[in-house]
Amino acid sequence: MPTLSYKYRIEPNKAQGAALSDMLRDFCGLYNAALQQRIEAYQRRGISVNYRMQADELKAVRCAAPELARWSYSAEQQVLRRLDKAFKAFFGRFRLGKKPGFPRFRASARYHAADFRAGDGLSIRKTGRVTFVGVPGEIKVRWHRQLPSKPASAILTRQNGKWYVIFHVEVKAVERASPDSVGVDVGLRSLIALSSGETEPRPNWTKRASKGLRRRQRAIARCKRGSSRRKKRVAVLARYHSRVANRRRDHLHRLSRRLVNRFGRIGVEDLNIKGLARGDLAKHVHDASWAQLTAMLEYKAASAGVELVRVDPRGTSQECPECGQIKAKARGEDTHRCNCGCVLDRDVAAAMVVHFRAFGFWPGAGLEL
């Protein structure tokens, strides 16, 4: 069964908010201490410390540090697992010949999340509120939708001064009766184009917000570095960025849900987003958020019983969907014109090629035998 994340806003009072902040600060200290132990053990004695060795010492550490003893034991184990995961990723990149990026010490001001097991360190009360070990009282939750089943784990996170809890829930896949299939091509002129001929315009969220961003950035530039006023201005800018990101995410959620509800099979390009985001169109690629849209399609398709197929993106915008010839196009050319007489919107033609590569037949040609 696929696992989905359900995010809810929580509203702690002043004392509870201070306790949650103290908890994240202590978890950050534990993370840095565990990292320091690994570094010193290897530098001084050549010993590679792993998660099991540090987890066995956790009880003694809690006895020596009373500030850690008041929080959930299993949540502190998750902090050590988080560090172990960072080391495994480091060595994995090293073996692949990539830029390793050794795990770094974390600043408490930028340590914003903690992992919990549902029922162990974090509990959902019958009143609909949540409790954390070490935090006084029950915390109000904005239940904007019901959980489909009992969560197995959760993440407490702080974003722009607001607190959220993210529950991980297993859901049963629903069988889809729709036999319709579609190829999806993502772009910058149109956010997506479908092999059926439909297109979705790109909202250009960054361009819409550019005036507000400039005004808030100029306000920061006028402040002295390290001053209280500058910190307030930075917080205002962060909230503005958050609102822009929320609008973008909401639009992608609605778009991906419409596609999943409408089609039983969806073909998408397996793009190298990181590579595209390093080019001269990086700003527009980030604003379009192709990776976020594809990720939403992937998990929604899994929970809805929809087949999602990734195809090789090379040449999809150059291949003719009628005769298969390669018709080179300039970046600013919006129409596909081929010698065979095919004239289509460039993105729609690419979506038709994506459909053929994903399912082996052209749109409207019937199901594959």
Image (cartoon, rainbow, N blue to C red):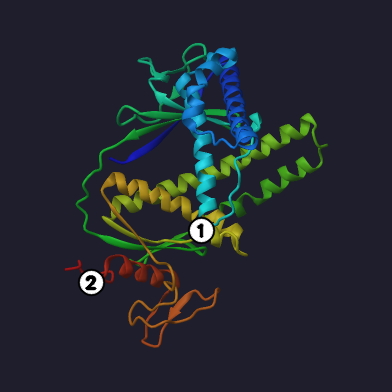
- Name the residue rendered at 51%, 45% in the picture: 89
Q: Quadrant of residue 169?
A: top left
Q: Secondary structure at mark 1?
A: helix
| Residue 267 x %, y % | 34, 61
Identify the mark at residue 365; answer none if there is no mark: 2
- Name the residue rendered at 31%, 70% in the picture: 356
Q: Is residue 156 visible?
A: no
Identify the mark at residue 253; answer none if there is no mark: none
| Residue 262 x %, y % | 29, 53
Kind of residue at badge 1? Ile
User: From the image, which quarter does the N terminus lie in?
Assistant: top left
Residue sitting nearer the eye, 335 or 3: 3
Question: Which residue appears farthest toward the front when viewing the image?
Answer: 45
Q: Quadrant of residue 310?
A: bottom left
Residue under circle 1? Answer: 273
Real-space Cα distance between discs 2 and 1?
Answer: 31 Å
Q: Quadrant of residue 162?
A: top right
Task: Determine whether label 2 and label 1 are within 8 Å by CB.
Answer: no
| Residue 369 x %, y % | 16, 68
- Name the residue rendered at 38%, 67% in the picture: 351
Q: Earlier in the sequence, mark 2 or mark 1?
A: 1
Q: Is residue 52 visible?
A: yes
Q: Is residue 167 left or right of residue 36?
A: left
Kind of residue at badge 2? Ala
